[in-house]
Amino acid sequence: MRARSWLWTLCLLRRTAALLVVVLAGGIFSATMVRFSPGFGVDERELDSRLSSDTLAAIRQSHAENRSVIHFYAHYLGSMLQGRFGVSSTFQRPISELMHERLHVSLRSLAPALPLTWIIAFSAALSVTAIRNRVADGVSSIAAGGLMATPAAMVALWAASTGHGVEIALILILAPAMYRYSRNILERSFRKTHVMAARARGIGTASLMCWHVLPTAAPQLIGLIAVSLSMAFGALIPVEFICDSPGVGQLALQAALGRDLPLLVTLTLMVTVITYSANAAADAANQALAPVSA
């Protein structure tokens, strides 16, 4: 028991150290990409002919501190350690306030959308795998493929024009991909040797799926749930922008259009932390379930 707790503590420390490295690398990488992107440092206000030369000089000076990636990131990390993330040049507001307001809106949309997506996708994949019907498999594959081929912006435009909202758009975007991935995982598990042997012995479909297929597919399905969090935040960008929902996705696109380096780096770090934490939680769940499934 003591050895097991020591292993969990060591694993936690290793994960925490890896998270710090990933956050630092992700922040400097995003800052570098934004810094050397076309049009960086250009402000739309400079096109206003009514502004004086002193005002234009002040605008250019406000962007000067972000021209050096190393200087910017060192200053940003120092502010972050003090609990501050700087001020957004696009909104002229503290980034911590923006993140608190926008993240609350996005989480309110994701709270019902993600569980419903998981239920729909896993239920459909489990049903199609269990019934072993080529027609049902073909129809579901065509429907999922058609929805996956539909641009997320078109789904968001349909949701906005019909008044269905962000939640329905997210489900339509995420559920087809989740279904295809989970269907492939379950199908591979169904073709395992021990599953085929159990099926040859006459074990019923329900027992076969519950006691043989699902335990084999569980680690990959748990990992897929973790991946779906990253997919959801990626889908939020076009959906919230088109549906005019003031969440993190809309904020990310506005920050990109305004070349707001401090805000973009903060958003990148947030997504990095969420993605890594979800993957770490999935690994921990698989480790906890391993003795049971064995």
Image (spheres, rainbow, N blue to C red):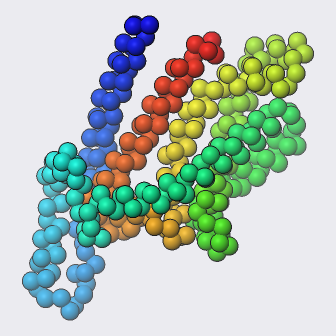
Visible residue check, residue 29: no
Residue ID at (32%, 44%): 26
Q: In this view, does 154 lie to the left or right of 100?
A: right
Image: 199 above or below 253: above
Residue ID at (74%, 19%): 212
Residue 265: percent from the left, percent from the top? Answer: 30, 53
Residue at the left extreme, as displayed: 54
Badge count: 0
Image: 37 above or below 243: above
Residue ID at (18%, 51%): 79
Residue 214: percent from the left, percent from the top? Answer: 70, 25
Residue 164: percent from the left, percent from the top? Answer: 66, 67
Visible residue check, residue 159: yes
Residue ID at (54%, 23%): 286
Q: Is residue 259 left or right of residue 274?
A: left
Residue at the front extreme, as displayed: 1
- Where the C terminus falls, by quadrant? top right
- When asked about the image quadrant of residue 180, the answer is top right
Residue 237: percent from the left, percent from the top? Answer: 48, 60
Image: 194 above or below 214: above
In the image, 17 versus 6, the foreground residue is: 6
Q: In this view, does 272 lie to the left or right of 285?
A: left
Residue at the right extreme, as displayed: 202
Q: Is residue 125 left or right of residue 113?
A: right
In the image, 51 versus 127, the foreground residue is: 127
- Where the N terminus falls, by quadrant? top left
